[in-house]
Amino acid sequence: MKTKFVYLSILLAFSLSGVNAAVPDCQSVVIGSGVAGMKAAMDLKDGGNKVCLIEKMPFPGGATNLAATYFVAVGTKEQKAAGKFISVDDYVARQKKMLPNVDVDKLKAQMLCSQKNLDYLNSLGANITRVLSDYQIGTADGTSLGSSIVKVMFKALKEKGVAFYPNTKALDLVLKNGVVTGVKVRSGNEEFVIPTKNVILATGGFAHNQKLVKKFAPEWAGLPTTTAVGSTGDGLEMAVEHGAKTAYTDVVRMNPSVHSENGVNSSLSVDFSHYFRWLFANFRECSLIS
Ligand SMILES: Cc1cc2nc3c(=O)[nH]c(=O)nc-3n(C[C@H](O)[C@H](O)[C@H](O)COP(=O)(O)OP(=O)(O)OC[C@H]3O[C@@H](n4cnc5c(N)ncnc54)[C@H](O)[C@@H]3O)c2cc1C
């Protein structure tokens, strides 16, 4: 499913609060600065777009900062050299046994991107070379995977000239005749609309939104989560509110992690739905998200 909404260009920026000065000039707005949003922003910039990357938190990276251990990659030259090689077809067959409902075609398409994605991140300096298994590779020195990725991607993004707006929360999509023409945001005390040609929703998961957890994974409702506080499913809610169709919402990924509260240890982190995973995967040929 694509998240790109195209419309006839609006030339004048306007502000709901009557303040025009702070409205950025953006051909494309990417909402959310995790790995998905940063890659989308850089790809759009490479395509000649004037890109604005907006982020509701004061810093970039979202849940990507928390990705602790391994990059999922299959059939890479690093794994071959380490004697931990499995073909993509064998890996997909193995996954199919464990997860009968897995979308085999999409899994295969993503896994075929393993080397390309790994080489891309390492070309930026992520140093993901320590082979852990036939489908897992970690950073060479054991540094947390996600923070390494965010560090190098954010650096690359700034070098490319992508404008980054922290503390800027997308509140809603603005539509005209069924076509998205802008994004309503809150920055500080001000609410205004950023007019734009393209909007990419890359707002990550929804584990911190109990309403959505109850709706899509009622069996996990009420459990604590160790994911990022910004993971509240904003993009999903915005898109659905305007009639977007969803897919893969029946598949919610859980990360095993320990949460202690009042002497009780829980061990689940509701992470994200595959809906968002494949949303990004379809945007470009190869997704970076495992
Ligand atoms: C504890 C933990 C460990 C993990 N370990 C691994 C691992 O070892 N390997 C692995 O591959 N994956 C791991 N993952 C999963 C991985 O981190 C995520 O799948 C991935 O980072 C998701 O990237 P994303 O860009 O889609 O979302 P995010 O990185 O969450 O980015 C979304 C961004 O959007 C922002 N945002 C949300 N709403 C708005 C709004 N309305 N306006 C503006 N900005 C908004 C958020 O603040 C956030 O910065 C782990 C996840 C967790 C929680």
Image (spheres, grey):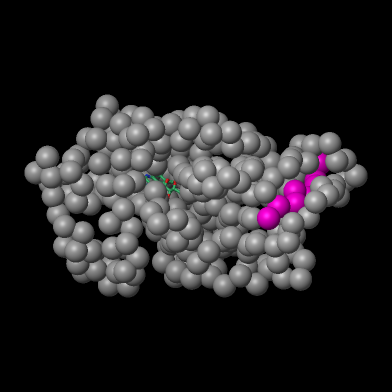
| Span highlighted in magenta in the image | 190-197
Rendering coords of residue 246 (x, y %): 53, 70
Rendering coords of residue 89 (x, y %): 19, 64
| Horizontal side, residue 100 vs residue 133: left or right | right
Report the residue at 41% width, 66% height from top: 251
Q: How many marks?
A: 0
Q: Residue furthest right?
A: 18
Rendering coords of residue 281 (x, y %): 43, 58
Report the residue at 63% width, 36% height from top: 163
Q: Which quadrant holds residue 187?
A: top right
Report the residue at 25% width, 41% height from top: 137
| Horizontal side, residue 25 vs residue 92: left or right | right
Q: In this view, does 154 lie above or below 13?
A: above
Report the residue at 73% width, 61% height from top: 8
Q: In this view, does 147 lie above or below 91?
A: above
**Nearer the observer, 122 or 140:** 122
Prevailing secondary structure class for the magenta stretch in the rendered image: strand
Can residue 184 be seen from the camera position used here?
no
Rendering coords of residue 88 (x, y %): 21, 59
Q: Does the magenta stretch include residue 191?
A: yes
Q: Is residue 90 magenta?
A: no
Q: Which quadrant holds residue 82?
A: top left
Can residue 162 be seen from the camera position used here?
yes
Q: Is residue 141 above or below residue 189?
A: above
**Nearer the observer, 1 or 217:** 1
